[in-house]
């Protein structure tokens, strides 16, 4: 995979109420996706409206001539509260030719990843922010 996962804990976003429009009962992340989009827009990053997937939410973004998908999902610690773990999967988009040639992979120091980490780290109610897997 060509992605880096950022994981953190907070109780700021909905992990307890399954909304009527959710494709599946586990499709939490709508509010986090909208929030991260707003933070990216504030920093001059082009970011599209989030859309629902069967596992959570996703949005597309463009930064420094690169395109990305940001996947967002979360799991409640106890199944009834908003306290839980969130994941933002940052995937760098590549053309078929780049994939075949092994070019354009996301780097450990990718500026989009660092920007999202900075946004998360600036929030006093976000805890245990870390990269879960780094497959670069």
Image (cartoon, grey):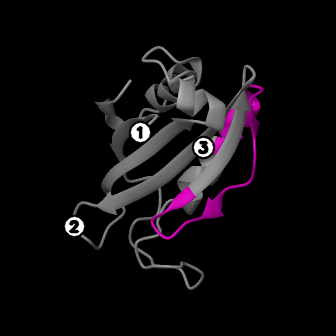
Q: Is residue 73 above or below residue 70?
A: below
Q: Which of labels 3 and 2 is toward the front? A: 3
Lower position in the chain sequence, tag 1 or tag 2: 1
Residue linked to disc 3:
69
Measured from the top left, where is residue 46 in percent x and y? 78, 35
As drawn, the residue found furthest toward the top would be: 109
Q: Is residue 94 visible?
A: no
Residue extent of the magenta highlight: 37-57
Q: Residue at x 62, y 47 (%)?
A: 35
Measured from the top left, where is residue 126 in percent x and y? 39, 38
- Badges 3 and 1: C-beta atoms under 8 Å apart? no
- Badges 1 and 2: C-beta atoms under 8 Å apart? no
Q: Is residue 49 magenta?
A: yes
Query: Dot 1: within a 10 Å radius of its alpha carbon, few (fewer than 14), some, or many (20 or more) residues?
Result: few
What label does residue 78 carry, if any? 2
Lower position in the chain sequence, tag 3 or tag 1: 1
Q: Which of labels 3 and 1 is toward the front? A: 1
Q: Which quadrant would the C terminus be assigned to in this image?
A: top left
Q: Which of labels 1 and 2 is toward the front? A: 1
Residue linked to disc 1:
1
Measured from the top left, where is residue 49 in percent x and y? 74, 54
SS at badge 2: loop
Q: Is residue 96 left or right of residue 128?
A: right
């Amino acid at each position: 995979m060509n992605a880096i996962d950022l994981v953190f804990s907070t109780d700021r976003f909905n992990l307890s109420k399954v909304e009527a429009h959710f494709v599946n009962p586990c499709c939490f992340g709508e509010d986090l996706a909208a929030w991260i989009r707003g933070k990216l827009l504030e920093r001059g990053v082009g970011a599209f409206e989030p859309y629902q997937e069967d596992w959570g939410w996703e949005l597309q973004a463009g930064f420094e001539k690169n395109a990305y998908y940001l996947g967002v999902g979360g799991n409640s610690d106890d199944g009834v509260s908003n306290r839980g773990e969130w994941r933002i999967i940052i995937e760098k988009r590549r053309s078929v030719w780049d994939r075949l040639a092994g070019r354009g992979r996301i780097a450990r120091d990718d500026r989009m990843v660092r920007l999202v980490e900075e946004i998360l780290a600036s929030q006093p109610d976000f805890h245990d922010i870390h990269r879960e897997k780094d497959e670069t």
